[in-house]
Image (tube, helix red, strand yellow):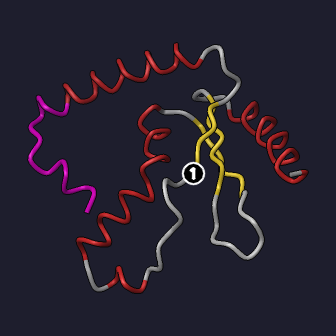
Amino acid sequence: VRIRRGENLSAADLIDCHRNRADIQARAAEMAIPFDAILMPTCAVVAPAIAPLDADEDAYGAANIMMLRNTTVGNFLDTCALSIPCHAPGTGPVGLMVMAASQHDEWLVRIGLSVEKILQKS
């Protein structure tokens, strides 16, 4: 479903997309310098039941895009990220995404462990 969005791109369009992405990545990295990490929900909404989506390709596509919306930001910006479960017992899975600069995986794990300890106390 998602791959079809690029089926009509020309080579020139793709080159422009890569240039624009590199520019956005550089600006986002500069804006993030003052912060140790960026936090956001891993998913924009709680995951829907999959059974009703199996029979409806359009509904599946819409749900898929919504579920991947926040993680796609990290992928587009070429950051590293992890998700820490933060839902109440007995409720649907919810995660807190902790995102750091590209190639800062070890730093991200240290921050993630600290955030996890804080969440466990609350």
Q: Which image quadrant: the N terminus?
A: bottom left
The residue that label 1 is drawn on is 42
Q: Is residue 7 above or below residue 94?
A: above
Q: Quadrant of residue 4?
A: bottom left
Asked whether, in this view, residue 56 is left or right of residue 51, the answer is left
Which residue is at a point 67% across and 29% down the rendered structure image?
37
Local crowd at mark 1 within 10 Å, few (<14), some, or many (≥20)? many
Q: Amino acid at mark 1?
A: Thr
Q: Is residue 70 magenta?
A: no
Q: Which residues are magenta?
A: 1-14
Q: Nearer the viewer, residue 45 or 97?
A: 45
Asked whether 18 or 24 is in front, the reply is: 24
Residue 91 x %, y %: 68, 72
Instruction: Answer above or below: position of 106 versus 25.
Output: below
Q: Quadrant of residue 65?
A: bottom left
Q: Residue at x 88, y 47 (%)?
A: 117
Of helix, strand and loop, which one carries label 1? loop
Horizontal relation, residue 1 to residue 67: left or right: left
Say above or below: 38 vs 113: above
Residue 13 vs 46, above or below: the answer is: above
Point out residue 54 in the picture as x, y percentages from the top left corner: 34, 83
Tell me the quarter of the picture where residue 18 sits: top left
What x and y, as percent, mark residue 114? 85, 39
Seen at 28% across and 86% down, the residue is 55
Q: Would you say the magenta stretch is mainly helix, strand or loop?
A: helix
Q: Residue furthest right?
A: 121
Q: Is residue 3 magenta?
A: yes
The residue under the point 62% across, 46% down is 97
Task: Judge left or right: residue 113 versus residue 28.
Answer: right
On the image, the x and y values in percent for residue 86 come to: 73, 57
